[in-house]
Amino acid sequence: MRPVILGCGNIGSNVASSLIKRHGGLELIVADKNLQAAQSLASRLGNRAKALPVDVNNQEELERVVSSGDVVLNTIGPFYRTALPVIDAAIKRKVHYIDINDDHDVAATLVFDPSYDERAKQAGTMILIGCGATPGFTNLLAKLACDRLDQPRTIRLCWVVPFFLEGFSPGIMDHLFHMLTGDVIQFIDGKHQPVAAYSGVRNVEFLPPFRTYPAYYSGHGEPVTLGHFIPGLEEATIRSYFFPQAADDLMRMLVDRGFGNREIVAGADISPLDFLTSYAATESGRASLGVDLQGETVGFASQVEVCGSKGADEVKIIFEEQGLLGGGESQTLDSTPVCARLALEGVMDGSITGTGFLAPEACIDPVPFINAVIAETGKSVHQREEIIRKNVFKEPG
């Protein structure tokens, strides 16, 4: 297969470079709205890479680029703007599609509108979304836990991170405000439903050096696809929290005051979000918007908790990942490019198969994938299992 990689930023460039190094003779297309960025990447990769311009809002150009290969990896965010046009182009041109989508509404559209699944199956193509670190790796941890139970009932995900301006690119800021504004989709009481972002507060206990945090509903793809693809679930939810409390208060205030608005302000020629991201990148912006971490770890923690029945017992399985932020040799490697590349390679070599709308938990064997990610990134995943109640399903004697 000949892959097409859309987006020549950090993720796309990383995947492309790794593919060239790992697969002798492989030819690929790298495409970006900024042709110079695509050409620069192709030049570094050598004569097996070809650069093309692509604007996802230009249907003719998009279809031409997508059809230049057999499988397309979309790394262009924010995905609530880019995913569906590329998916439509891939289906029309009968090309397999993979992305690292992390927006809840994109996943919800694919779940609620069966025409995408139907059209992709008719075209003989797969639409595989959410193949990054989160969603992606997190989905497969959830699937692994579900596979260890006779009947999983609840999946509760949570991530916590400091309000870390130096690590929040404009694309990340756009996504953060999108997932924390208005209603977001969760899977509760056996059905998908909208809930208000920042609602549903739950105290989530993490391992040291992290602690217990009051996390709240936020918009991400995991609950949408897990609730769709794993049968018998009563709940699949995701929560998040910025620490310390002052950081979370700051983010809530920015959301409430409209700084996530993407509409151009009349007479100002800039949107509140563009202004905020530009200001946050300046020295004065970092000084004004920065928050004292008060001794908290400069890092992130992510947890997947799955509860259900195992034999006659009610069991809880927890996977927890921790990492460091802020640069330096100790910084934890972002696993998103590795996850995306492994998914792409799986489609290319035929170890990942299927047609129609798919997510990692629907088509990827979790154990070898998880082990491969851990081996390449050096990340550690803490596992613990506990019996909540014994013999709760035992027939009375």
Image (cartoon, rainbow, N blue to C red):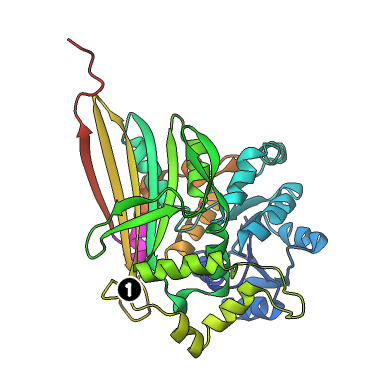
Q: Is residue 130 shown in magenta?
A: no
Q: Is residue 359 visible?
A: yes
Q: Nearer the viewer, residue 135 or 367?
A: 135
Q: Quadrant of the C terminus?
A: top left
* Residue 72 picture quarter: bottom right
Mark 1 falls on what kind of element? loop
* Label 1 environment density (alpha carbons within 10 Å; few <14, some 14–19, many ≥20): some
Report the number of numbered marks.
1
- The magenta stretch is 373-380
Q: Residue furthest bottom?
A: 283
For image coordinates 57% across by 77% down, the residue present is 277
Q: Nearer the viewer, residue 283 or 148?
A: 283
* Residue 2 picture quarter: bottom right
Residue 339 is situated, as x and y percent measured from the top left of the image, at 46, 58
Q: With 127 as the anchor, is 377 left or right in this view?
A: left
For image coordinates 40% across by 70% down, the residue present is 247
Most common secondary structure along the magenta stretch: helix
Q: Quadrant of the N terminus?
A: bottom right
Q: Residue furthest top?
A: 397
* Residue 302 picture quarter: bottom left
Tag 1 residue = 298
For image coordinates 42% across by 53% down, the residue present is 216
Q: Is residue 15 above or below residue 159?
A: below
For image coordinates 72% across by 39% down, the residue present is 119
Instruction: Name the residue type under label 1.
Output: Val
Q: With 201 as the anchor, is 387 left or right in this view?
A: left
